[in-house]
Amino acid sequence: MNLFTQPRDSPWGVVDYCDTLCSGVYLVYTPEHGGIMVAREIEEFLSPAARQYGQRKNGFICFEQDADEEIVLRELLDKKLWDIPDRVKDRAAFEENINAALRKNHPQYWRSRENGRVHTPPAKTATAHDDR
């Protein structure tokens, strides 16, 4: 069950149809263009570095298909909220295409993502010797 209403209007025009990537995240198509729209209520799953590339429209943060939608796809994959569709035969190549586009078009985002992945310390687990 999807708790969110699919968008009818986008920054790129009236939505012809959309695919739900996960609850509240839509890949939208218009007669001329499209992109990914993320419901405001769940946008916190996106990193601050990712959110800065979106534009706001009708309760969504929107990412244009030619320039920015790879950011959302990368974030969804990293957080295991979306799987590459079965129709994609070479999933490793698909994922590398996302990464290559991000390295080329959004190097600052890519650095932020990589720094967060490399420098995030593991969560500390409590032991019997902890005084806290």
Image: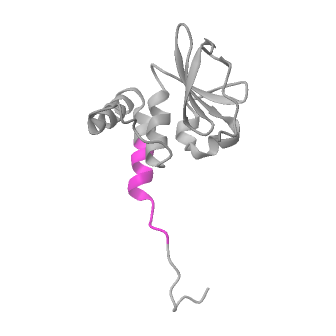
Q: Is residue 2 left or right of residue 130?
A: right
Quadrant of res 119 = bottom left
123, above or below 59, in the image? below
Quadrant of res 9 = top right
Q: Which residues are magenta?
A: 111-123
* In magenta stretch: residue 24: no
Residue 31, position as x, y percentages in the image? 55, 7
Q: Residue at x 49, y 42 (%)?
A: 76
Magenta segment main secondary structure: helix
Q: Residue at x 62, y 16 (%)?
A: 15
Q: Quadrant of the N terminus?
A: top right
Residue 107 vs residue 3, the one in the foreground: 3
Residue 95, position as x, y percentages in the image? 33, 37
132, above or below 72, in the image? below
Residue 100 vs residue 79, the one in the foreground: 79
Residue 79, position as x, y percentages in the image? 48, 49
Residue 130, position as x, y percentages in the image? 54, 88
Task: Name the residue at the bottom extreme.
Answer: 129
91, above or below 117, in the image? above
Task: Name the residue at the front extreme.
Answer: 1
Residue 37 vs residue 71, the one in the foreground: 37
Q: Quadrant of the C terminus?
A: bottom right
Q: Residue at x 28, y 39 (%)?
A: 92
82, above or below 36, in the image? below
